[in-house]
Image (tube, rainbow, N blue to C red):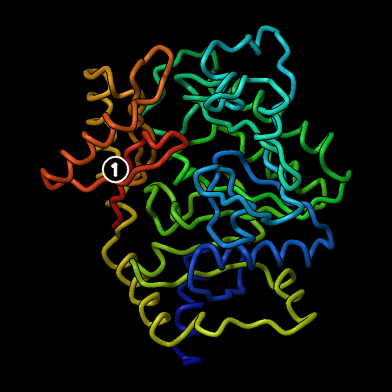
Amino acid sequence: MSQQRNKNEDRLRRVSKEGLQVVYFVNSGSEANDVATLLARLHTKNYDIVSFKNSFHGASMGAMGLTALSSWRFNVPTAHGVHHELLSCIHKDEFDPVPEPPFHRKILEAPGIEPGSSESVAKNFDHWTTKAMNPDVYRGLWGGSKCRDSPVQTSRECSCSEGHCKASEMYYGQLEEVFKYSLPRGKVAGLFAESIQGIGGTVQFPKGFLKKAYELVKINGGVYIADEVQTGFGRTGEHFWGFQMHDVKPDIVTMAKGIGNGFPLGAVATTPEIAETFTQALHFNTFGGNPIALAVGSAVLQVIEEEETQKRCSEVGSYLLKKLEKLRDEFDCVGDVRGKGLMIGVELVSNKETRAPLPAKSFTDIWEDCKDMGLLLGRGGLYANVSFFFLYH
């Protein structure tokens, strides 16, 4: 068993190349994110965690607290001390136009509830998390045709110049509001971020945003946790890890799904310094890192390396994205095409101008027709109107 563990750890260290030399093996992404949360709090001796609206980090009690999608949250208390990026007051200036419907209403709208009413606020703000804006250049307040690191850009226009994304600056300002008003000064435990939001609809952040967020959490005493459960292992094509496209160096990386190619396996990679905090008490996982799981994980990494699946993800993914872009230009119901490598999302709408989501019945009809023709698609996004092309290596 120790030989298999050492073999798998060595492979992960080689592909990581980020100084994350200690690996904890678990059984799922939810478990991995629970461990990462504990490590962050133990190492920093701080408590508050920040994650983004529209994120998905798992379904355990702890991971559900990190998740900010109502469709994945039960009506029970979850993790305390978790903050989701706050939407502050909107100020009108040349970089911050008053948003048009429906974007500024969607946050507080619910059937039978008047937006902005006390009942609406109660529905959206609870005792454990701060509900928030998401840095989404297609559906969010800011963003346009030059803001994404993708072969396909949103059809929204923007005046950003090369190397200067105004949307990134505006969304970063929202994140600063959280640190300014909702967190103890200089006492943050960590920031969780998916490199591309998966279950939330394959949402890509504006260029440069995550790097600024990374720097902000570091100067406030926290660690940066990269959730690579969906974006890791070369799926995005250009890089082996999704966080590499944002030019950040995380303190903790969580991984699952692709690491076992369908087998229940997850892992947390971190630095020896952070890992040392686990010696404060006993900690173990009954089935995490069992011999069969480790054999599977080692074999998957070997195939990824030998068959150059990362390169295939880049080539096939870029080709598919450009073909899907033509569908967006041709059909009124295709609002947005986005992604990188073989992590791809297609958002279906009923109105391209307002970006109103395609009704559930219409989406389901298309979804089922695709299945009958032999094309299996995932489904996600806040409004369940995004088709996922779950094309792994």
Q: In this view, does 381 lie to the left or right of 182?
A: left
- Residue highlighted by disc 1: 317
Q: Front-most of 157 and 373?
A: 373
Residue 145 in percent (x, y) is at 44, 19
- The disc labelled 1 sits on which kind of residue? Gly
| Residue 275, visible in the rendered structure | yes
Q: Front-most of 130 and 261?
A: 130
The residue most toward the right is: 185
Q: Front-most of 112 and 291?
A: 112
Q: Residues within 10 Å of mark 1 (few under 14, many from 20)?
A: many
Residue at figure coordinates x 48%, y 73% from the top left: 27
Residue at figure coordinates x 44%, y 50% from the top left: 239
| Residue 164, visible in the rendered structure | no
Residue at figure coordinates x 42%, y 81% from the top left: 294
Query: Looking at the image, is 391 positioned above or below residue 251?
Result: above
Q: In this view, does 217 lie to the left or right of 365?
A: right
Considering the image in quadrants, where does the C terminus appear?
A: bottom left
Q: Helix or strand or loop: what does disc 1 sit on?
A: helix
